[in-house]
Amino acid sequence: MKPKPMGPIPSGYAAIDGELAIGGRTASELVEIAGRTPCFVYSKVHLDQRVSDLRSAMPERLGINYAVKANPFAPVIEHMAGLVDGFDIASAGELEMVKAAGIDPARVSFAGPGKRDEELEAAISAGVTLNCESEGEAHRALGIAERIGKAPRIAIRVNPDFELKGSGMKMGGGAKPFGVDADRVPALAREVISAGAEWRGLHIFTGSQALNPEALIEAQSNVLNCAARLASDIGAPLHKLNMGGGFGIPYFSGDAPLDITAIGGALGERFEALPDSLAATDLCIELGRYLVGEAGVYLTRIVDRKESHGVTYLITDGGLHHQLAASGNFGTVVRRNYPVAIATRFGTSPEEVANVVGCLCTPLDRLADNAYLPIADVGELVAVFCAGAYGASASPANFLGQGPAAEILV
């Protein structure tokens, strides 16, 4: 059977005594610390390095925000608090998470359509910036603020007239549930300001998971042009501009790491020639997957090895209920293999083609198809990389009563 290529294993992972090591500990040791399999292991070293590299590449003026939705594991949030400038949340539940981590609500912004009244009230009471997604949401926020006697901090999320080319998920351009259409933003902003709200600025998010630096450079240029034009039309300064994110990571064969040096260089040139309407604006980008995705590994144990019509199956105690994206069931049209390895034989030469599947009674539960791997048997550990974002919290953990995986930060 012809092997199917796997995605590239992220840099920074090595072997100790023939096993995958994370944070200086072998996979077997990490499973003991976690207490069971399956488990997610997140690496502080990778998180620190990623933010350090990003700051070195980007203009000093640019702030970095962490999108909590990518990985809301409490120790990860607490660790990121010392690395980034701000946090972006998408629910009252995430608001409670950042508050529990001791993060100042003044560092937090709240985006997402469909905010409930109780969520708006919680955010206003805490002093979080609301990125309002519609006129109706802004009006509800103003009404709640008047009722509780506290001025809301309000920004407007813009649905721009352009998109991020090559984006895995397009979040701007054309009809969208996200944000206020650009031509309607100035009128709403003036209304918010005249109502006595603390005007915070704009949030312009165009897409996610882009690996083409030229596309991101173009999108960032368009964002700055759009913000400058809107600021002039509004007639009030922008205290902050959230330029969105979109930085992708390599998941599949043929993907290459994003060239952040090129992006930072182009952004630095733009910052040197900003119009007066943005001269005093706090500028930031909002990243989730790019910051934490490659810092996570999902470890699952082989519980059975079988053959069917000449095909070898390594059946694990994990699966799509923890790694929906790796299974190909999280928006992927054509299923491709994530980077996968036999953690207990890390660095060993491959000898067989095998399918790595999960424990669920559905043919959708696949972690690797026709993967060229070292020969592995019952009891050994499989590692799925790029598991630090949209894994544990974005997968149906309770499907078939399986329950969540363990999580640790090392």
Image (cartoon, grey):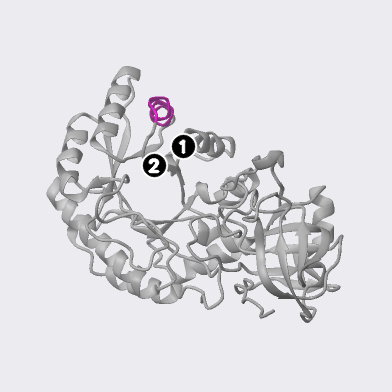
Q: Residue drawn at (59%, 39%), measured in percent from left and top?
A: 101
Query: Could you say which disc has been placed on residue 112 in the image?
Result: 2
Q: Could you tell whether 97 is left or right of 194 in the image?
A: right
Gap in angstroms between the C-alphas marked 1 and 2: 8 Å
In what element is the residue under mark 1? Answer: loop
Q: Amino acid at mark 2?
A: Gly
Q: Amino acid at mark 1?
A: Ser
Q: Residue drawn at (56%, 76%), measured in percent from left and top?
A: 253
> Quick one: quadrant of the N terminus?
bottom right
> Which residue carries the number 1 mark?
91
Q: Residue drawn at (55%, 71%), measured in percent from left and top?
A: 252
Q: Where's residue 260, x and y in %?
A: 45, 72
Q: Is residue 286 visible?
A: yes
Residue 352 on the magenta segment: no
Quadrant in the picture for residue 199: top left
Query: Could you say which disc has been placed on residue 329 in the image?
Result: none
Q: Where's residue 45, x and y in %?
A: 66, 63
Specify the principal SS of the magenta part: helix
Q: Is residue 26 visible?
A: no
Q: Where's residue 383, x and y in %?
A: 72, 63
Q: Nearer the viewer, residue 176 or 162?
A: 176
In what element is the residue under mark 2? Answer: loop
Residue reaching furthest to the front: 309
> Quick one: quadrant of the C terminus?
bottom right
Q: Could you tell whether 294 is left or right of 376 in the image?
A: left
Q: Where's residue 140, x and y in %?
A: 29, 27
Q: Are marks 1 and 2 in contact (CB under 8 Å)?
A: yes
Quadrant in the picture for residue 209: bottom left
- Could you classify mark 1 by the number of other residues whose Cα lies within 10 Å: few (under 14), some (14-19), or many (20 or more)? many
Of the residues under marks 1 and 2, which one precedes in the sequence?
Answer: 1
Q: Which residues are magenta?
A: 116-125
